[in-house]
Image (tube, coloured by chain):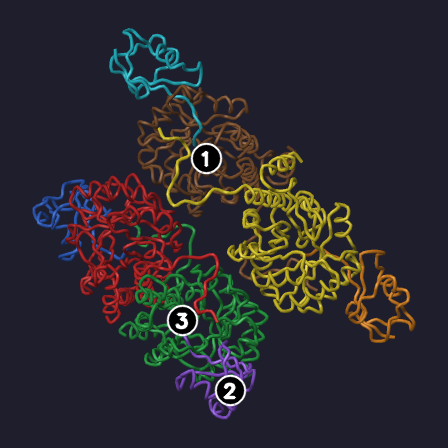
Chain colours: A brown, B yellow, C green, D red, E purple, F cyan, G orange, H blue
Amino acid sequence: MNTDTNEVHLTMPTDEPAPDELVIAGTVFGSRLVMGTGGATNLAILERALRTSGTELTTVAMRRMDATGGTGVLDLLRRLGITLLPNTAGCRTAAEAVLTARLAREALDTDWVKLEVVADDRTLLPDPIELLDAAEQLVDDGFTVLPYTNDDPVLALRLEEAGCAAVMPLGSPIGTGLGIRNPHNIELIVARAGVPVILDAGIGTASDACVAMELGCSAVLLATAVTKATDPALMAAAMRDGVRAGRAARLAGRVPQRFWAQASSPPR
Amino acid sequence: MNTDTNEVHLTMPTDEPAPDELVIAGTVFGSRLVMGTGGATNLAILERALRTSGTELTTVAMRRMDATGGTGVLDLLRRLGITLLPNTAGCRTAAEAVLTARLAREALDTDWVKLEVVADDRTLLPDPIELLDAAEQLVDDGFTVLPYTNDDPVLALRLEEAGCAAVMPLGSPIGTGLGIRNPHNIELIVARAGVPVILDAGIGTASDACVAMELGCSAVLLATAVTKATDPALMAAAMRDGVRAGRAARLAGRVPQRFWAQASSPPR
Amino acid sequence: MNTDTNEVHLTMPTDEPAPDELVIAGTVFGSRLVMGTGGATNLAILERALRTSGTELTTVAMRRMDATGGTGVLDLLRRLGITLLPNTAGCRTAAEAVLTARLAREALDTDWVKLEVVADDRTLLPDPIELLDAAEQLVDDGFTVLPYTNDDPVLALRLEEAGCAAVMPLGSPIGTGLGIRNPHNIELIVARAGVPVILDAGIGTASDACVAMELGCSAVLLATAVTKATDPALMAAAMRDGVRAGRAARLAGRVPQRFWAQASSPPR
Amino acid sequence: MNTDTNEVHLTMPTDEPAPDELVIAGTVFGSRLVMGTGGATNLAILERALRTSGTELTTVAMRRMDATGGTGVLDLLRRLGITLLPNTAGCRTAAEAVLTARLAREALDTDWVKLEVVADDRTLLPDPIELLDAAEQLVDDGFTVLPYTNDDPVLALRLEEAGCAAVMPLGSPIGTGLGIRNPHNIELIVARAGVPVILDAGIGTASDACVAMELGCSAVLLATAVTKATDPALMAAAMRDGVRAGRAARLAGRVPQRFWAQASSPPR
Amino acid sequence: MKAIVNGEHWDLPDGSTVSDVLRRLDAPASGVAVARSGEVVPKAEWPDTPVRDGDEIEVLTAVQGG
Amino acid sequence: MKAIVNGEHWDLPDGSTVSDVLRRLDAPASGVAVARSGEVVPKAEWPDTPVRDGDEIEVLTAVQGG
Amino acid sequence: MKAIVNGEHWDLPDGSTVSDVLRRLDAPASGVAVARSGEVVPKAEWPDTPVRDGDEIEVLTAVQGG
Amino acid sequence: MKAIVNGEHWDLPDGSTVSDVLRRLDAPASGVAVARSGEVVPKAEWPDTPVRDGDEIEVLTAVQGG
C-alpha cells in the first residue's frame, strides 16, 4: 500500500529498521494491530473489518463442536492469510487453561496461545496466581505464550521471567471501552520489558489505540471496539491508522510540554 | 492512495459523502490536516514534512522583506500545489490585523486569512474583543476569515454569526504541546457550530489530533508539533494518520463505555 | 471553632498572616467559601446548610416582587450575619446588568455585586464583550464588582484592569457539576492576578473545591452543589472542609511527583 | 471538637451511625486518617504533625536495634495514645514478612500488622503471589492483617477471602505523590469489598485524600505526603480536613453531572 | 391612567405616585427597589415621583439565587 | 456403554472409538481436537482410542472469540 | 526627502515613488505588498504613488509561520 | 563461641544466653524482639535460651517508617 511505502521511506532517516516490523518469538508481522474475532454479527462483516484492519494476527476461541457451528472463522482467517492465535477465554484455573491450550494446539497446528485465566464474570480480570501458574506450565510444554494480564508491572515482569513471548496488559476491563485507565502502569511495564508489550482489552476508540503506541507498546489487540462499532469496517480503518499514528509519533520524538506559550511565527 | 480508495468505499455504508471531504467556504480539501510552516529548520525538512502530511492548506506569516529572506516558502507551497493561508500572527489590535490581512491579500492574491489577534506574549491567547472586531471588519471587506480563537463556546458562536468561514478554537496555548485541555468546551462548540470547527494550537502528538477529530472537529491545524519534532517527516505521517483515524472513528460510531466487563468470546 | 484555633496556630510557621484571612476590596472574611442561595427546597434547609458551611458572604438574585415571595432570604442572611452579595443573574446585556446592579444597591444598601451577563440559556456562559462593558460601567459608578467570567486568562486580566475587586472564573458551566475542566487556565489566571481569584460555577463535590484552592484560588463560590445534594447540610460541611483542606495544602507545600517509587521506611 | 459535634448532628438525617466511625476488626477509630511515621526530620516535627492530623492509628517499621536508635517513636505514639500498626516494610518474600510480623507482635504486644511484601526497589509494588501467601499464613497464626496491595480488584478480593481485616490498595507507587491513578479500579474494589478499603500509597496532596473517600474508601493511609511537605503540620491539617471532606461528600450524595448548564437562580 | 407594573397592566388614578404603587403591592419597608421606565427611583423620591401614563414600573426584591 | 460427549449422555456400542464419536458428530477433517476424561487424544490415536464406559469426551473447534 | 522604510531611515530623491523603493529593496516581482503610512498601496499604483516626506513605508512578504 | 548479632560477628563466652546478648546491646526493657536463626524467641525464654555456636541473632525494635 502506498502508505506503507511512505512509512518505509520515512523511517529511514530514523534509526529504526525499515520497514518497522513487529517481531514476536522470531515471527515478523507487518501490522501492529492484533484483532479478535468476537462480537461480529456475521462472517461477511468480519471479513471486511479484518481486511481493512490490515491485521496479520487474530484470535479465535475454542468451544464444543456442534453441527450448526462449522469452521467458518478458520476458513476465513486461512483464506486471508492471517496467523491464528487461539485463546483460552472462559478458563478460570490453570488446569482448564492448559488443557484448552493443548486442545487448540492439536486442532489448529499452532503452539501459539493467548493465555486467559479470568477470576470472575463481572470484571473478567485475570487471576494473577492461576495465570502465572498456567504460563509456567505452557512454557515448559513448548508453547509460545502471550498472556492477557492486568496492568501490574510486577506480574508483567514475572510473566516475562516465566518465558512468555510477550506480555499483554489491559487498558481497562474487557468490553468496557474505557481505554487506558492507568498510563503510568503501562509506562512502567514498557520501561522494564524485554519482550513486546501488547495493549489488550479496554480499547474503545482510535485515540485509545494511538495512546497505547505512544506509551511505547509494540502492538494493540482489540475485538469488540471494531466488531460492535456502528460501522465495523470503518472503525477497523480508524484503528489501523490510529495504531500507525501512535507508533510513528513514538518514533518521531514529540515536542516537550510547556506551561507558557511559544510562538510558531517569527516576531514582527 | 489505496487507503483513500478504501476510505471512499468504506464510508459508503455510512451517510457520509464519498469521498469524505472538508469543505470551507465552498472550497473542497481532500485532507483534514492544515499545516503551519513555522519552526522548520530549513526548507528541505519542511518540504518532506509537508509532502508526507498530505496537507492541502498551509499557513504563512507576513513579515518585513529583507534581502536575505527571499520568497522560498511561497515557491515551495506553490510547487507542492498547497493552498496558501496567510495569518496575522503577532498582531495585538484589530487595526493591525486588518492592515496585515489586506497586505497579505495584496501580496498573495488570496482573500483567505487565518485571523490572529493575541493579547500578550506569555500566553499568545486571543484577545476576544479585538478578535471579534477584526473579524467583523474583514468579513465586511470580503475576506474569507478563519479566526484563531480560545475555546469559549460563546465567542465561537459570535465569530460564526459575524460571518467567519470556520472557527479555530485552541486545544491549549500556542507551542505548549498540552493537547486538548478542555474537551467539554470543544464538544459544546461543535454541538452548536454551523461552520467547520478546526482545532488550532496546542497539539503535541498524534493522539491529540486524533481526539480532536473524535470530538467532532472538521480538521486540525498544527505546526511546531511536526516541524520541531525529532523527525518532522515521521511526525507528519503520524499526524496525517492520527487525523484520519480520529475522523473515521467519529464516523464509525464507537462502542459505549461500561463500568463492568463484557465478554468478547462466547460462554463455554 | 477549635479547628480554626488550630489553623491560626498552624499557619504561624508559614509566612502567612495568622489567621489566614480572605480580603476582598479591603473587607476581611474568615471563610473562603462563598455560598449561593439558589436551589434550596426551603429556608430551614438553607439555614442549616449556611450555618454548617461557615460562609460569611452569600449571593442573592433580584426578581420582581410578588405577594407570595416575601423577603425571607434577606431576613435569614441578616440574622446569620452573612454579608449579602446580590447578583445580576439572568441579564443578557450590559444595560440590563447595570440597571439590575443599581436596583440591588438601592434595595440592599450594598455596592457589592456579583456581575453575571450570560450569552444563552443552554450554556449560561458569560458574554465576554457585554461582561467587560458592564464591569467598566459599574466600576465607574462606584460598585465593588465581582464578575462571573469564563476561564479565559485574557478576559480575567481585562476585568482586573477594568477595576474589578476580584475575578470569578468558572470551573465548568453553571449547574453541570463537571468540576474544574481546565486547571491549566485557572493556574494561568492565578499566576497573573493581582486581585483574589474565586472559582465560581461547576463545583460538584468536595474534591473539586479542594482542587480549586490547591490551584491557588483565594476562595470558592458554589450553590446547587450543596443545596441540591441529597443531604445539603452534610455537603456544606464537606465543602467547608474541602476548601480548608485545599487552602492548607496550597500553603503547606506539597511533595513533588515522581515517576519511580521512593521508600518511606528505612532500608533493612 | 466542635466540628465533630456538628458531624454527629449532621449525620443524623442520613442513615449513617452517629458519630460516623471507622471499624476495623471490631476496633473503633474516630479518625479515618491512618498515618505513617516515615520521613519526618525529627520527633518534634512528627509530634506536631500527628497531633494535628487527629490520627488514631499509625505505622512503624521493624529494624535492627542499634545503640543510637532508641525507642523514641514508640514512646511518642504511646504518649499520644495512638494505636500502633507495625509494618513489614522491606520484606521481599512471604517468609521474611511472616517472621517480621511475629517479631513485631513480640516486641509491641499487638497482633495487628500492615503487611508489605514488595517485589523490587524501583516500584516498591507488592508481589501478588508472596503477598497472598504471607496473608494466609499470618491469618492462620491469629494476626489482624492489613495488606498493602496493588489496585487489582481480583487480588483485593482474594486477600479478603483469605481473612484479611481490611484491604489497602495503592493509589500510585509509594512515594511518587501521583495520587489515584486508576479511580475505576478503586471503585471496583469498593463495590465488592466486605471489609474496609484503605487507600494506601501515592497520596500527594489533600485533594487526593478527598477523592479516595469520595470513591468510597473507608480511610486513607499516608506518610511522606505529610512528613516531607514544606510545612508538615499544616499539611497534616490539610489531610485531616481532606479526608473528612471526602467522607462527608460521599455520604451527602453529590449532584449529578450534566452536559448542558442549569440555572441556580430563578428565571427573570 | 394606565401603567405596566411588573409586567401587568394597571389602571391608576391620576396623580398616583410610586409610593402608591408600592402600597398597593403591599411592599415591605426595606429590601425593595423601583425602576420607572428603565431608571432607578431612589427610595427618598418615591412619594414625590408621579407615575406617568404608559410608564413601566419594575419593583424588585432579593430572592434565593446564584 | 455410556459416555458423556460435549456434555450430553450418549449410548455407544461396546468397542466404540474416538473416531466413531467424531463420525457420529459429523466432525470436519481438520480444526478439531478431542479430550478424553481430561487428557488430549492426538489425532493419530483417534482410531485406536477406545471410549470407555463413563468417559467424558470433549470435542472442540475454533469459533469467533477474543 | 526623508522616509522610514521597514523601520529604517532613508534619504530619497524628491519625486521618488513606491516603485523606486521596491527597486532599491530588490523586491521580487510577486509575493510582496506595500503600506504607506498605514494604507495599502495596490501593486498597480506603485509607479504613480509618490513617497512623501516623513512617510512610513512597510514592505511585507510571506515567511514561514503559524 | 561465635555468633552473628544483627549482622556483626561476635565472640561470646560459652553458655551465653539471649539475655546476655541483649544486655551487651543495652536493649531497653520493652519494644524489642529477638529471632535466633530464623525463629522468634519469646521474651519469657530469653534468660534460658542459649546462643549456639554459629547462631544468627536478630534484635529488632520499632523505628519510624511506613
The picture places residue D141, in percent across and down from the top left corner, at: 16, 43
Residue that mark 2 sits on? E41
3 and 2 marks in contact (CB < 8 Å): no
Q: Position of residue F53 (x, y in %)?
A: 25, 12
* Mark 2, secondary structure of its residue: strand
**Is label 1 or label 3 in front?**
3
Frontmost of labels 3 and 2 is: 2
Mark 2 or 1, closer to the camera: 2
Question: Which residue lies under the disc numbered 3?
Answer: C36
Answer yes or no: is residue G29 visible: yes
Q: Residue furthest bottom?
A: E48
Q: Are marks 1 and 3 on the same chain?
A: no
**Real-space Cα separation, disc 2 to disc 1, in angstroms:** 81 Å
**Classed neighbour count for the residue bearing mark 2: other residues with Cα under 10 Å, few (<14), some (14–19), many (≥20):** some
In what quadrant of the picture does the N terminus of chain D appear?
bottom left
- Which of the 4 quarters of the picture holds residue D249? bottom left
Image spot of residue G54 (x, y percent): 83, 75
> Gap between marks 1 and 3, in whole Å?
57 Å
Number of residues whose C-alpha sits closer than 10 Å to that of mark 1, classed few (under 14), some (14–19) or many (20 or more)? some
Q: Is residue H11 left or right of residue A142?
A: left
Q: Which mark is residue G36?
A: none
Point out the residue furthest to the top here. Answer: F15
Q: Is residue A186 above or below residue E41?
A: above
Residue H63 position by quadrant: bottom left
Chain to which the residue tagged by mark 1 belongs? A
Q: Secondary structure at mark 1?
A: loop
- As drawn, A206 above or below E12: above
**Label 1 belongs to which residue?**
A195
- Residue in the picture at 66% in, 47% down: B22
Q: Given the image, on which type of amino acid does mark 1 rest?
A: Val
Query: Disc 2 marks which amino acid?
Result: Val
Q: Is any part of residue D71 visible from this angle?
A: no
